Image: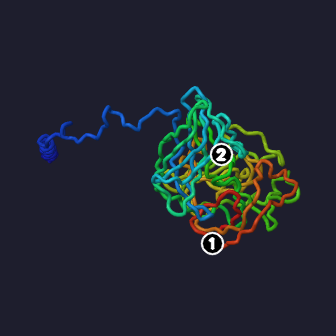
Amino acid sequence: MPVRRIGVVAALLLLLAAGCASAPAETAQQIQPPAVPPGGIAPTTKFTPLSATTVTTPAPVLGTDGKTHVTYELLLTNATPAPFTMDKVDVLADQEVVLSLSGPGLAAQANLLAAQTGDKGAGDPDGSAAPIPGGGTAVVWLDLLFDGAAPTALTHRVSGSVGGGPATEIDAGSVAVSTAAAPVLGPPLRGGPWYASDGCCVDDTHHRRGLAPINGQLLVPQRYAIDWYLLDDQHRAWVNDPSKITNFLAYDQPAIAVADGVVVDATDGFADTTSLPRPPPIPPIVETVGNHVTLMIAPGVYVMYAHFTKDSVAVKTGQQVKKGDVLGHIGSSGNSTAPHLHFQVNTEPTFFPTDSTPFAFDCLRVDGQVTERIWDDVLAEQPTPELPYTASTDTSERRGQMPLDRNVVTFC
């Protein structure tokens, strides 16, 4: 019986080989070649003083302002020895300009790569964009808003001059926009009101502007991250003495799973910040997120919770969790200035390196807005714990939206 089976298989293989051999081969003469312009170069082709690239594949998400946000970075490198003066950057969809930056607006949304600080401003909002020196690179921080669906591709156009010469307009390439929907998640925390500090998308926060070279690649690993602080009815994140982490309302609050998933990383054992109200020294890179939990909720979709208090991580690596399960309790471990939950969605199971992608929540209410930028690292040093606040005129339930920077929300 085994001999017969081998013989049948061999016969089938011979028949298949014969069939393949008898099929006419497609030759180069039979393939329709693409159209090539005379001389082999299109008449619109030209040398350009700038090269352009993007850091990520832009992905759309619906914000609490009712707009679809497409947020990404455009890197412009000056390939000439003379400085390039950047006057205007246009972003186009279907040949229509959807965003135009110039003057102070461009200066506020662009900076030289060598001058990148990670937060606290990226340019002179009252002036013009800094010239790009020969061999230098500028970052243009883009946040596009659409009333409906986002386009599937975006094109960039840069206007300026080289070395004070005549004005020129440069086609700075295009980028495809992801057609994947942002994941809609359950709440990472219970109730509220929760202050979404350093969130998406337009302000120069240390999350949004945190461009960093990691393992030889430029990344923005916290692009859509949110630092969550619990507030009381007086809009205070802390009461009494802010040098004690237990006086922050978020301290020891439970963080919960936003979806069913598996724990791919659960780390505990790091001490909480002891330098309040001053920021702590920056820890080694491996301690950046302190005590933390990372869940895989879908292939290539990882949710990270950072800065848990010591000995509070409630799950183990490899453990299956259900939506709503407690993962740990808020603290101030790692590179943390005060007790809060750092929350984000990653493309990798690690914090460094990763790309930060958008997400939305299945149900929340917007209670109000913190009206002034108060940096996390000086929050505990404010003369009063009450945050400047404006109440929302619409506190109805919102579904499938992402909180924007400085929103104050309550989860349904």
Compared to residue 346, the image places residue 219 above or below, namely: above
Report the front residue among 95 and 113: 95
Label 1 crowding class (10 Å Cα cut-off): few <14, some 14-19, many 20+? few
Residue with the mark numbered 1: 397
In the image, what residue occupies the spot 84% across and 48% down? 277
Which residue type does callout 1 highlight? Glu
Q: Where does the image place residue 188, in percent across and percent down from the top left?
A: 64, 61
User: Distance from label 1 to label 2 (Cα)?
Assistant: 39 Å
Q: Where does the image place residue 232, in percent across and percent down from the top left?
A: 79, 65
Instruction: Locate residue 50 relative to residue 252 in the image: left or right.
Output: left
Among numbered discs 1 and 2, the one appearing first in the sequence: 2
Q: Where does the image place residue 408, in percent across and percent down from the top left?
A: 71, 63
Q: Where does the image place residue 412, in percent across and percent down from the top left?
A: 64, 70
Does residue 129 appear in the picture of this structure?
Answer: yes
Which residue type does callout 2 highlight? Gly
| SS type, badge 2 | helix
The numbered mark at residue 103 is 2
| SS type, badge 1 | loop
Extreme residue in the top direction: 81
Residue 238 quadrant? bottom right
Instruction: Locate residue 45 relative to residue 38 in the image: left or right.
Output: right
Compared to residue 294, the image places residue 63 above or below, namely: below
